[in-house]
Amino acid sequence: MKLNKPLILGSVILSILLIVVLIPGILTDKDPYSVQTLKYTIENVDGENVFLSAPFAPSQRNKWGTDELGRDLFSFIIYGTRLTLKIALWVTLFRFLLAIPLGLFSGFNYSVPQNIIRQVNILFSGLPPLLFAVFVLYLNVFTRLDKRLSTIAFIAVLTLVGFGKLAQALEETTKTVLSKPFITSEYLLGKSKFEVAIENVVPHIMPEIVVLFFMEIARVLSLQIQLGLFSIFIGNLKILLASTQGGSFYWNVSFEPEWASLLGYATVRLRTSPWMVLYPAGAFFVSVLGFNMFGEGLRIKLQDDQTQFVPKVRKAVSFLFLRKHRQNPVHSKKWMISGMVLVLLVAFVVIDFGDSGLGDEIYFTEEMLPERLYVGMDEVNDVTDLLAQEMMKNGFQPVYDEFKQSYEVEPNYYVKESLLKINDVVYVQDMGYVMMSFNDVEEISLPVLDARDISLYNVDNYTEFQDKAVWIDINYYNHEAIEAFSSQLASAGCKALLVTGHDKKVSIGSFVSHVPYIGLGNDVELKDGDTITINSHVSLLSDKGINVVGMIEGKDQNISQEVIVLGVPLNYRSKEYAVLTYNYVFEIMKKIQPISNRTVVLAFFDGTYKNDNHGILRFSKGMKFDPYMHIEYFSLRTLEYGTDPVIINKDQSPDGKYFGVSFFQSLENTALQYEFVREQVPENVSDLLKHPDFVMHHKKGIDTIIFDVYSDADVFYESFYKALKENN
């Protein structure tokens, strides 16, 4: 028996590709999404240390070198095998789904499918399929799509340009079978066209379909190569290089691991960095060779006179489509099991299975935390102890000598207990209202006088405010005016001052008013004549703030010195929100710990409700790592979970920086709803460098992204984790 060499060679190549698709992690431990655009070199040039910029040549760390973003080429190609072959497989499947019925019906001389095949082939005989695909896929509407939509667009366009010739080939094969003498005998036996098609035509054209299927995958891969040379690929990402009055200039790269994207470098990098082109070209060559050899080997095998392929196919399709062949339950069970195995195998290859979601781990409960937590409170020491213990338990490393870092703050007063009841409705401190002056007040009930339309500047006699709670709009008065009016109101017998329109969130400060001074929240319902009941008990806070800072070290030696900082408020107004925050950020860190290529720092900052006391100011003064090596600082500034969009300020993360751009590219592929905002920057340089929102970027040069989270906690943290994981 003659050895079928093409089938053996094709089987070996396809088996290797299948292993790479199913278990890429056994071949490389590097993350294909990790970037390193610069790295130190130990060599000296004229006595000075220098930086090397990507792409980096093949070395012991990077077997096949890197691309222009510093991504390891070997892992990029290994992980890109699934996406590249998935595109080819889906395009081939859809081409056959269109071509088989059109070819069969055309073979039986139905006019509509014949006209469709002819018109499509006429179109693409005058307009080359490659040119059409380039023209369509190069439109801005396609180049800006994310991975999912970009994949759909590729499949649709590549299917459209190729199914016509395939359908024509199947039409000719069908007509050849129908011209055989035995077909006439089948009609004489009383069979319908459907039965002839199922029992005679399909089994005889099936060998050709099987061979063409593998050959067609090779053709689609070849088309992907050509599109790659035109810089058309999946997951296109535009990075701003420069912007002038004449326009903006972008650099097109692929965010997703995919072979064709690397071929776009062929014209500019073949001489200077040949590895960037030769390795992906080699991957394409081997794959195309494998599918062609396997298809040719099947052709040789199926043309063997001793093969039982046609009778088996006839039996299978008859069982599926003709009732008279469905009587054997054993065969039915066998076909069902075989079909399920095939479906599961295809699903495993083409579907990306992510890891399990967040929200499963519980590190903190509401019983473990105080109702509220602000800088200087006695409870801060207990909560920071819990956070430090949890970091140690989960294998974090302290950034400094200890997880807890103390710093001095301006001492303030804090309203430890208070009451605000309007008629019969009781409101919660720091959620429904805030105490804006810091006096001990025994419980008292008062009628409300609405003075929002009265200018206190023009009142000569304050006696009308006696034994009242006066309600004013703070937008019309500054702090000095309030202080002066409170003295006059107290002298006239006023018992309380209520204000709306304020922006204060917590009952912390140093202002001691002559009358109780209360800021009402937007959800407080109040009208003239209502009865208000108040009391207040004040305590002095300490002059010490405490940050809790820990880190997980990066696993990739190339970029482990690069640092990502996640800044989280230690302080909170609601322990329900605090429990969600603490649990989610610890779970994110735990999940990312075994796979993080960069070093990730988790910092719980104290003093977040008062700019001068904010822990980020202390953190920025004694940073352990070189600021230059910080890739991004994520500031979770506001965490008040609900149903509104997340507000993001990315003004301090320039569009020309790859990490920030790719992070938001990933975020777009999640369920998170968010809006970008621009915020006013302090004009005074001294104020700018001391402001917690700007100190990391303007003083240390670290790219900063600020989040104000008003969305569902689960959606936000799931989306944030996905984007962080894909870019680290």
Image (cartoon, rainbow, N blue to C red):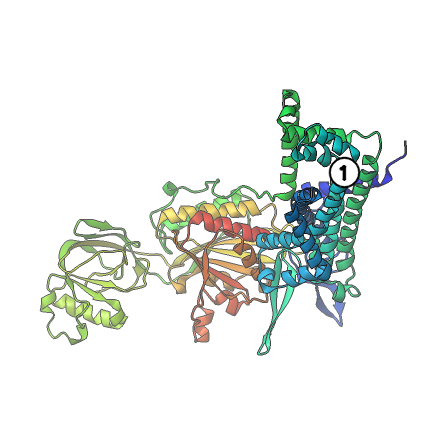
Q: Nearer the viewer, residue 458 or 607?
A: 458
Q: Nearer the viewer, residue 154 or 416?
A: 154
Pinpoint residue 358: horizontal percent, then vertical percent: 50, 44
Secondary element under disc 1, as helix, strand or loop, is helix
Residue at 77 percent across and 49 percent down: it is 288
Q: Is residue 518 left or right of residue 129?
A: left
Q: Is residue 629 visible?
A: no
30 in relation to 141, above or below: above
Pinpoint residue 410: horizontal percent, then vertical percent: 37, 63
Pinpoint residue 664: horizontal percent, then vertical percent: 54, 58
201 in relation to 86, above or below: above
Q: Give the quarter of the image for residue 243.
A: bottom right
Q: Give the quarter of the image for residue 463.
A: bottom left
Quadrant of the image containing the N terminus: top right
Q: Give the quarter of the image for residue 474.
A: bottom left
Residue at 46 percent across and 40 percent down: it is 362
Q: Is residue 537 left or right of residue 4?
A: left
Mark 1 lies on residue: 177
Q: Would you call the spot at circle 1 few (<14 residues within 10 Å), some (14-19), or many (20 or more)? A: some
Looking at this view, name the residue that lies furthest to the right: 2
Pinpoint residue 192: horizontal percent, then vertical percent: 66, 32
